[in-house]
Amino acid sequence: MADISFYTGEDIPLELHKVRIVQKLDLVPVERRAEAIREAGNNTFLLKNKDIFLDMLTDSGVNAMSDRQLAAMMIADDSYAGSATFTRLENKLEEIFGTKYFLPSHQGRAAENILAMTFVEKGSIIPMNYHFTTTKAHITRLGGSVVELITDEGVRLTSDNPFKGNFDLEKLEDLMKKEGKRIPFVRIEAGTNLIGGQPLSLENIISVADIAHKYKKLVVLDASLLQDNLYFIKTREESAKGLSIKDITKKIAEKMDIIYFSARKLGFARGGGISLHDRNLYLKMRELVPMFEGFLTYGGMSVREMEAMTVGLDETMDESVISQGPLFIKYMTDELVKLGVPVVTPAGGLGCHLDASRFIPHVRQEEYPAGALAAALYIAGGIRGMERGTISEQREEDGSEHLASVELLRLALPRRVFTLSQVKYAVDRIKWLYDHRDIVGGLRFVEEPSSLRFFFGRLEETSPWQDKLVKAFREDFKDSL
């Protein structure tokens, strides 16, 4: 990675790419933004793209492709079976992970479905450092349950711990002793999404695998956010600083029985799949691919995307490529810290995370502060983020609310998409909102699905606070959108 400093002493991230295609953005007036968020049921997933200025909802499937990826799409082999495109992708995964077998799927949650249908049954327990929404839904749908074994540091939002995604190894060992018969596999999420994209150390990953294998349990890696985790291991873990990104990847992969991923994140493309070392495990899941995804050489993916993914996976082994996300996220996080805005520290992967519990502490958790903050920030700046709090959970069986461990507003920074000035704009509007935080109120459901409600549930204000927010904005930005 290029180590570039500025003569003036300014500490800013430097884009290691040039822009050759642009897409026009529009910033609609604040009055229209207030209308749009109400039309969307105060759910940023339901906003129309025409009303969005900076889309920081996710990095999934919206990272900018490289010129090499776009060029590779032109050589795709769209044969239904025996495609050379599939062979190139399979070979690249073997080169990176050392895996012999690959099952393609149209995206990561499709891979999760195959894994759950193969290994989870009623009464199963799946230990993991922290859950992800779709992962948990697939497991609970089949009668299983999730046990989170994140270290105490993981949910301590303000910290200087470099690896807050680590497992508590003692808790894992205890669970294995008590409930081993009910555990089919241990799931490791590299870059824990719901608690700020916080990474695991290489040492912790290896220790988790060793414990699981001691009890003859499979180890499954969700590698969707692996690229950020690799960067953090390389730069934060003393024992790994002399290793290349490829070396670190191979050390992780050789300890895993199954690696699955969303290529909408890993590989800068759209698709996913499951990589394995063992043929028997491969055969156990193989029939589910043509049943639910597509034939074994495309699995529901476009072959053009598969070619782009092959190149994207290769680029993931380049530290100067995978550093860009974490560096810009760190810059945004550090700027907000300077302004006194409560954020998750240290900066993790995927995006900058606002701590809604401290941002608007007067909003009770039962009134969904992270969701309210997402709606408020959209009004303040046309910025679409994603609620990662209680709305992202689902109710208990008795209908009571399951309060999340953390209430976060995630502002994703898709790779190679936003400029530094756009990040500065987002920081400015967040600071304005923080200075007017007392205006923001809560939300309540008016249309609530039983699961994955954060995708398509609809909410309304508990008081007319959004009109007050618009009025305050107009007073401070008379001539601005």
Image (spheres, grey):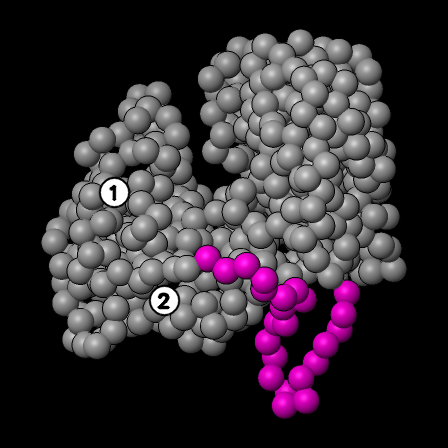
On-image quarter of the C terminus: bottom left
On-image quarter of the N terminus: bottom right
For the record, the magenta segment spans 1-23
- Which residue is tagged 2? 430
Judged by its main secondary structure, the magenta piece is loop
Residue 368, picture quadrant? top left
Distance in Å between CA atoms under marks 1 and 2 = 21 Å
Residue 155 x %, y %:
51, 49
Residue at the image point whose x is 39% and y is 30% from the top: 452
Rendered view: 375 above or below 235: above
Residue 268 x %, y %:
62, 45
- Which residue is tagged 1? 40
Residue at the image point whose x is 63% and y is 21% from the top: 299
- The type of residue carrying mark 2 is Ile
Residue at the image point whose x is 35% and y is 41% from the top: 45
The secondary structure type at the circle numbered 1 is loop
Q: Is residue 474 left or right of residue 268?
A: left
Question: Observer-nearest residue: 412 or 206?
Answer: 412
Q: Is residue 400 left or right of residue 98?
A: left
